[in-house]
Image (spheres, grey):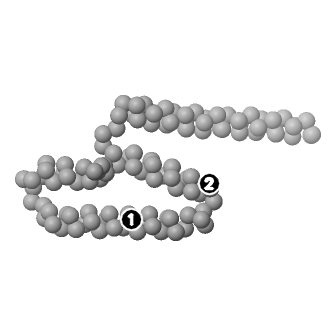
Amino acid sequence: MQTSCAEDRSDQFLQKGADLAIDKELYRQALEAYRQWCEDKLIDRARNAEKLSPREGWQQYVDLWEFCMKLCLNQSEWQRKQKLIEDWLAQFAEALKQQEMLVEYRRLVESAKSLQ
């Protein structure tokens, strides 16, 4: 049976924290409540799936994937590099958008000057 990243982390936490004063039963109850909440949210998404546009559905999928990647502690070297590249590309796209806006502004100023 395959375990989730959250389950692995909770088991690691309980093993490493054996010397800490933790109410294990209360922790397990809280974890079970969280799992139930996640399951209810997933069921709600499935029920409302036909009400979403394809774009909204895709955005929810991307958001969920990014959230899961942030939770996973053991990122591979490839995942770290991919994240760096994505961040760099986002910054580059923003700079390019600002440059295009500056060019458009200059064009408008020039056309306004020529009208005077």
Spatial distance from mark 2 to mark 1, Cα to Cα? Answer: 23 Å
Q: Which residue is farthest left? A: 19
User: Residue 65 placed where, x, y %?
Assistant: 45, 49
Mark 1 element type: helix
- Residue drawn at x 13%, y 50% is 15
Query: Is 52 placed left or right of 25 in the picture?
Result: right
- Which residue type carries mark 2? Arg
- Residue drawn at x 30%, y 43% is 73
Query: What numbered label is drawn on residue 39?
Result: 1
Depicted 13 relative to depicted 46: above or below: above
Query: What numbered label is drawn on residue 77?
Result: none
Depicted 66 relative to depicted 27: above or below: above
- Residue drawn at x 20%, y 64% is 28
- Which residue type carries mark 1? Glu
Between 108 and 99, the residue placed more toward the observer is: 99
Quadrant in the picture for residue 97: top right
Quadrant in the picture for residue 89: top right
Depicted 83 relative to depicted 35: above or below: above
Depicted 52 relative to depicted 58: above or below: below
Name the quadrant of the C terminus. Answer: top right
Mark 2 element type: helix
Residue denoted by label 2: 55
N-terminal of the two: label 2 or label 1?
1
User: Residue 95 placed where, x, y %?
Assistant: 61, 35
User: Residue 26 placed where, x, y %?
Assistant: 18, 67
Q: Which residue is farthest right? A: 115
- Residue drawn at x 19%, y 52% is 11
